[in-house]
Amino acid sequence: MKKMIPVTAVCLCSAFCLLYFLVSEKVSGDDYIFLMLLLFLLPLSLKVFLNYRRLSGKEKNYPIFVRDLTLNIKTGMDPVKAILMLEDNDYGALGDDVKLLASNLKLGVPLSQALEIMAHNTKSGKIKRTISIISGSVKTGGRIEEVFTILTAYLINDREMKSEINSKLLIYQSIFFIIFIIFIFMNYFLQNSILPMMVESGFPVDEEFYGMLMFRSTILLGVFMGLVSGKLAKGSISGGMPDVFLLVFVGWVLNRTIF
């Protein structure tokens, strides 16, 4: 059900755009440029959003998996049996990776190799690093319980810190969006109050040119603010594609409905 929310939002945005292009008599060249930009951002934004949510789900559930594995090992189970006992547990987005790990172990794949396959499939750098520690401790032997206990404490603490950081970054993202909306309404005030007053006062002002300039500046601001927001919140420029899509669409809608 949750996976349908972004798809539904994209469908509604697309329907609104299509309706505007069919009904409006004020379609300009800039609108067609916006439409091409939207068609480029649409699949890319969906892909980035779904991949990011899947990866976040795996990293969120991974400390729980390691904690359960540690508890099983502390009861005296060997690592292979401890993993097999967790096969049917619910680990959300990580569940398929845990099932794959257990299936490989049942087929006789060595534990270290099965762990490496799991690490590769998760596509998470954090999970890969911690699994390399687990694999190394299994190969060398020694006091595995202590290694798993320390690793569990680290992962749970890291998850709590990441959650706190994300909540703070959400405030900065909100500020970005507020600034973007304020910029649009400042343009509205300029075009509907300041420029007409200048025309009435006898200043040679090309209102159509300034309207086009404000529209293009809104779209460009949406693109770059979205990219910065993605870098800030998700750690990568590509992670800002959903934010770019949202800001560009909101900017276009407000320009074409209130101006």
Image (tube, rainbow, N blue to C red):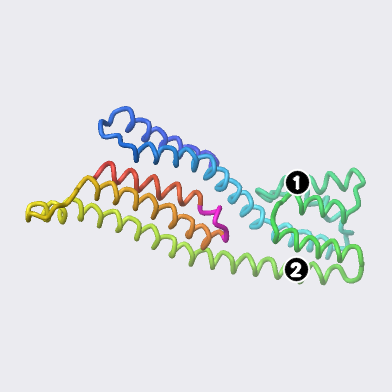
Question: Which residue sits at x=81%, y=65%?
Answer: 133
Residue type at mark 2?
A: Leu
144 lies above or below 256: below
2 vs 251, left or right, is right
**Residue drawn at the location 32% of the way across and 33% of the way down:** 20
Q: Nearer the viewer, residue 113 or 104?
A: 113
Give residue 104's quadrant in the image.
top right
Q: Name the residue at the left extreme.
A: 201
In the image, the segment drawn in magenta is: 235-240
Of 159 and 259, nearer the camera is 259
The residue type indicated by label 1 comes to Asp
Real-space Cα separation, disc 2 to disc 1, in angstroms: 23 Å
> What percent of the width, then of the height, locates residue 194?
15, 56
Secondary structure category for the residue under label 1: loop
The residue that mark 2 highlights is 151
User: In x, y percent, where is residue 258?
Assistant: 24, 45
Relative to residue 27, is residue 196 drawn left or right?
left
Magenta-drawn stretch contains 238: yes
Quick one: label 2 or label 1, which is nearer the N terminus?
Answer: 1
Please provide percent x and percent y for residue 96. 72, 45
Mark 2 residue crowding within 10 angstroms, few (<14) / some (14–19) / many (20+)? some
Q: Residue at x 69, y 66 (%)?
A: 155
Tag 2's secondary structure? helix
Q: Name the residue under label 1.
A: 88
User: Considering only vertical position in the picture, is 223 above or below 163?
Assistant: above
